[in-house]
Amino acid sequence: MTRVRKHIFGVDFEHIEKGYHLSPSDETIREKLATTRDFDAFIFWLDMEEALKQLTPRQRECFTLKYLEGYSTAEIMKKLGITQQALSKQLIPAKEKIKYFLKDGCETA
């Protein structure tokens, strides 16, 4: 399934997002922009949840700690009791699987 994003031309987004004293049409654009961003974030999270299902449990654990929860490499190594090499062996294929899934929108083998 391919999602197509509509293009909006001639809109000063910085003014819309940060500006004060907006015209009624600018207020409408601001509301639509916020709604679109919220919806895009929700769709992305649904895609990410599906992508995470493609990982092994250990890959999922390492990926989640590193990229979703923001732990440093050192913190993950300490928390899981693994070496940097072992962590890399989990993260590298996990990132590739996630990237492939999100790019193509299909399950990996």
Image (cartoon, grey):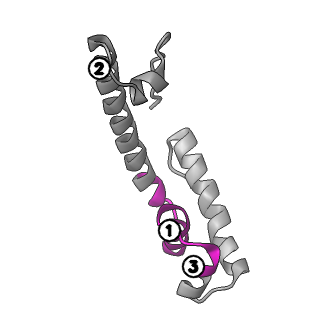
Q: Which mark is in front, 2 or 3?
A: 2
Q: Is residue 84 left or right of residue 109?
A: right
Measure the alpha-carbon separation of dots 1 and 2.
Answer: 41 Å
Q: Is residue 74 left or right of residue 64?
A: right
Q: Quadrant of residue 67?
A: bottom right
Q: Position of residue 102 (x, y in %)?
A: 53, 45
How far separated are the C-alphas under marks 1 and 3? 13 Å
Q: Position of residue 12 (x, y in %)?
A: 48, 18
Relative to 55, say whether 77 is above or below: below
Can you identify the residue that label 2 sits on?
27
Which residue is found at the position 59% from the left and 55% from the top? 97
Residue type at the position of mark 3:
Ile
Identify the element where label 1 is drawn: helix
Measuring 50% from the left and 49% from the top, which residue is drawn there?
A: 107
Q: Which quadrant of the figure has residue 25?
A: top left
Q: Residues within 10 Å of mark 3 (few under 14, many from 20)?
A: many
Is residue 78 found left or right of 46 in the rendered image? right
The location of residue 104, given as percent across then percent down, is 56, 40
Which of discs 1 and 2 lies nearer the camera? The answer is 2
Residue 75 falls within the magenta-colored stretch: yes
Task: Say which residue appears at 48% left-offset and 54% top-offset.
Answer: 51
Residue 106, position as x, y percentages in the image: 50, 44
Q: Residue at x 34, y 24 (%)?
A: 30
Q: Residue beneath label 3, please? A: 76
Tag 1–tag 3 contact (CB < 8 Å): no
**Would you name the residue on which mark 1 appears?**
60
